[in-house]
Amino acid sequence: MSELRSPLQAQVVQWLVGPGDTVREGDVVVILEAMKMEHELRSPAGGRVRERLFGEGETVQERELLLTIETVAGTAHGQRPAAQAPASPAPATRADLQRVLDRQGLTLDAARPQAVARRHALGLRTARENIADLCDPGSFTEYGALAVAAQRSRRSEDDLARNTPADGMVTGLGRINGDRFPPERSQAAVMAYDATVLAGTQGFRNHQKTDRLLGLALRHQLPVVLFAEGGGGRPGDTDMPIVAGLHVPTFASFARLNGQVPVVGIVAGRCFAGNAALLGCCDVIIATRDSNIGMGGPAMVEGGGLGVFRPEQIGPSPVQHANGVIDVLVPDEAEAVAVARRYLSYFQGSVARFEAPDATALRQVVPENRLRVYDSRAALHALVDADSLLELRSGFGIGIHTALARVAGRPVGLMANNPLHLGGAIDADAADKAARFMQLCNAHGLPIVSLVDTPGFMVGPAIEEQAQVRHVSRMFVAAAHLRVPLFAVVLRKGYGLGAMAMAAGGFHAPEFTVSWPSGEFGGMGLEGAVRLGYRKELEAMPEGPEREALFERLVAKQYAAGQATNMAATLEIDAVIDPAQTREWLVRGLAAARVSTEPPRPLIDTW
């Protein structure tokens, strides 16, 4: 005989067996209720029910006897007699689960074929397609998928579920470059405005979703990738009793990530108003050639009485690339995603496998003729690991090149003067570009390699109209706040304040300052120094060949005095090296130098 006793004080709700019934071990035989919750009790053994001791509705105490079971041969181990064995029905999806699956299905692209087709007809991808391409397969976990637009007062629930999935924004966590970096380095927060839903506008619910994800990113120090296409604030959300909605914390939360984690913005199509404000907070902006970026779309411009324009006329990509808004300009979304993955990799760590370039190619970068221009990007490519160079802001501040790359697998930032523009002189745009690049590398712990070839800061009445004094001084202030090591290599001209700014403020500020044999140095450009310092001597000679000959002799004398070997002899620089040894110097310097652990000091930008 087997007994079934109550495990708690409860009320008998329902008996599922009666005297004489045959049961298996584990069958549910009675349901009790306690504290509004039902408890299923199962048979302790197989057999035949002999007696029920309580009726339905009666209260039982803990450990009171409920049921006795007489063991029957063949059922002791949970087996019914063959005649009573029920057929096993095919498992069915529970109704509650099916409701959730159906509801989740409405959030996917497959549920909206017409909207997807319109998107593809424009040559663009959906938000979910971009995320699937960005994140490692199967790694994306979506947050807030079941949100809909806050428009229940004017639209049906079914309409909202079908036509405003995820409230026009897909958010979640996923892995990026997980094949090369461990999970703790490859995890990222991803947000994508869905242009097929209410034009990718910013609604009440998707602001909440954004804030939720930004909080996680800040708490766990996760990089953030934002697909920012969309039209800004949405006036159609009517469920919330608000007037202007200016208490939204999203913009402050997004800006709070600055300097804490890498933040990447991607744009294809149109990005206006609030969407553009978030985009502008990103460390780097990757945009397609067909993109338009502006702080106000056509409706806002017209509403302000500023004229009637087509969307394509506002902030087209050629304009935004030339003025520095766009860091990397790409042909399409596929390339934008590829660049985003590559950009993030520099902040995810070193790699073990790399291909070193031909170091001897560096010997041919600088022409023997000191007056001949050259492309300093050749030095960048010949210095870093093969196929590792990613140039940033190539359309803006062209007097200085800035790029991310790897040296022996280790990520670094590089900047180089551009002799093809103003002879390498640093103008306001180039200084802004360099200062911000130093801040980027400093925030995320990337060592900086500076390739110097400049006659100094650009001078003259025209450049001073551009606030040159404030702009170029940004380089000194940014360098003074560096916690990462900086390595300076003088390729040719190292003159005046411009050269000092490229060397973190002075030639002894970097971890090392070395020069190639082609290096030449002075407090200012040689020609200017001779005209200024030898004015009386030159003016004493009659104009013509005789004066020019004296001028050339004096320049040659200054050049000889300012050669790299003389600078090294007076310890103003650390060494003169074979250009082919530059990479070796950097590898050793990177191994020895450290990122400072001191807390950052406050910075007041000169501009």
Image: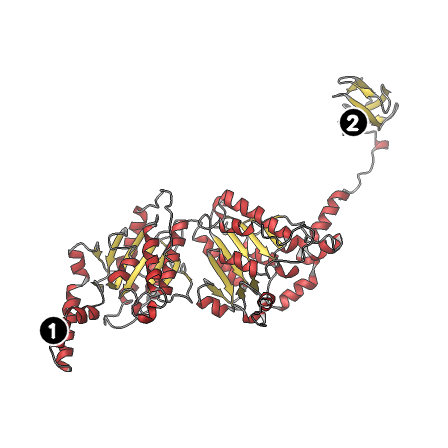
Closer to us: 586 or 172: 172
Is disc 1 placed on a helix, strand or loop? helix
Viewport quadrant of the C terminus:
bottom left
Mark 1: few/some/many CA within 10 Å (<14, 14-19, 20+): few
Closer to us: 300 or 447: 300
- Tally the marks: 2
Is disc 2 placed on a helix, strand or loop? strand
In front: label 1 or label 2: 1
Residue 19, image x, y percentages: 88, 23
- Disc marking residue 204: none
Q: Would residue 206 appear left or right of 525 to someone viewing this image?
A: right
Q: Say which residue label 2 marks.
A: 33
Q: Amino acid at mark 1?
A: Glu
Is residue 139 in view?
A: no
Indicate the quadrant where residue 498 lies: bottom left
Closer to us: 36 or 376: 36
Say which residue appears at 15% left-offset and 81% top-offset: 543
Q: Say which residue label 1 marks.
A: 537
